[in-house]
Amino acid sequence: MVNTVDTTAGAPEGTAAPRPGYGQLLRTPGAWTFLLPGFAARQPFAMLTIGIVLLVQHTSGSYGSAGIVAAVTGVSMALFAPQNGKLADRFGQRAVLLPGVLLHAVSVTALTVLALAGAPLWALFVAAVPTGASVPQVGPMVRARWAALLGSSEERARLLPTAAAFESVTDEFTFVIGPVLATALCTGVHPAAGLIAEGVLTLAGGLLFAAQRGTQPKPVGRRTGGRKRADGSERADGSGSSAGSAGARVSALSVPGVRVLAVVFLGIGSVFGGMQVSLTAFAEEIGNPGANGLLYGVFAAGNMLAGIACGAVAWKIGPRRRLIAGYAGLTLAASGLWAVHSVPALAALGLLVGLFIAPALISGYTLIEPLVPAGARTEAFTWLTGSVALGQAGAVTAAGQLADAHGASAGFVVPLVGTALALVTLVALRSRLTPKAPGRVAARGMGHRVPVAVD
């Protein structure tokens, strides 16, 4: 790891720049034009899985069946999300979002109607495939906009870790609101209300975000390649990455570090999926279904609070080491879930589990910037998002089957197994998370250059 001290433009050498923070990040010109629409567009995402679980469990009476339908949706999303990201990189985000949100609204409607009509399980599977495939990848698209906006200026580039933390906080805020809202609608209005609301909000928010064309990264096909520095050397457009030219049409999955992160993020998905189903089953077991939204909200609140803290800290260690530490803590915290049998204790432990998710997520997303060229970043972010969805799908299925057969406590074993396997993988393959160049040199101030940490 290389500890860095940035200097302000024109300041004497050795004068420390103000520490990057949320205030400075949010004052970045053009940021608010995509932040607010992006926030609205990603709200429904956290409602989808829990909405499907609650509706199908109501109509079928089985957590196992509900988990399998939700899992098909998650697998479909995981398979198609990277392709959507690749298309967004090549043709622009708007070109992918507009047809995507329309298809999603139609698919959610079909899935809801079939479930309420008592259709066979295979019919729900058929409807679940396009439902998952068409989930708009707004989170990765917002991250790609941050990377393009901040990467366009070497002075702004030091805000990239803060942007990653901010996006994690925003994501987790949706996981505080979404499950609680979906549960309240399903239990207080109608079992289908949560899923219907998800479809309507996705359509409205997606169209609003797609309308913000000025801040979307330029499609790869329209790029002209790297720009020349003042000293005549090449610099990739908005990339700042050692991974290659921003204009190169490369697959993000060709980068070894992305493949490692994609596997590791399955563990985070196992936590989300295992917690959603197991908390729902636990609330049913104690005769208080409404407690599900509260418990999951506390779990997500821990994630959000940790995300806020991560963005406010001036880290002395690199994102790779933070990722390993976050996963170690997450595995340890998840190890006690299966043994807890009271609401207060489960809420406290769920909060602790949530506190360790944000550092892992933020560190993983932060590693994308030095590993991947700008022309493939949306795809890279969607590989990670898709991996979370795939891990969530597997966890929903496994936890649903275990909860049906052995009770909610058995379902809580799934997050422990998922995070433990991911931690072993991460430790074994950690060397692949280092860019080819051991460090980058970024211009700071009047001819002053500072090494950038990559460990």
Image (cartoon, helix red, strand yellow):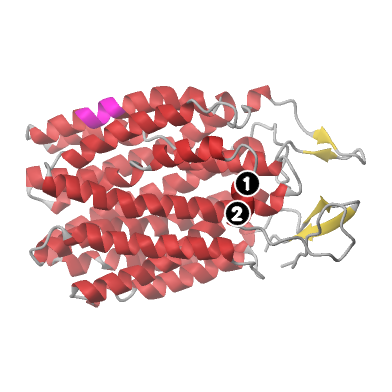
Q: Position of residue 297 (x, y in %)?
A: 30, 59
Q: Are marks 2 and 1 in contact (CB under 8 Å)?
A: yes
Q: Is residue 350 magenta?
A: no
Q: Is residue 106 magenta?
A: yes
Which quadrant of the rendered structure holds the N terminus? Answer: bottom right
User: In terms of depth relative to the viewer, which is nearer, 117 or 6?
Assistant: 6
Give the CA separation, mark 2 to mark 1. 6 Å
Q: Residue at x 22, y 44 (%)?
A: 51
User: Pointer 1: residues within 10 angstroms few (<14), some, or many (20+)?
Assistant: few
Q: In this view of the protein, can residue 67 be seen by the observer?
A: no
The residue indicated by pointer 1 is 27
Which stretch did the figure color magenta? 105-109
Residue 49 versus residue 279 in the image, above or below:
above
Q: Residue at x 48, y 48 (%)?
A: 384
The residue indicated by pointer 2 is 23
Q: Position of residue 235 (x, y in %)?
A: 80, 39
Dot 2: element:
helix
User: In terms of depth relative to the viewer, which is nearer, 22 or 159?
Assistant: 22
Q: Residue at x 14, y 30 (%)?
A: 113
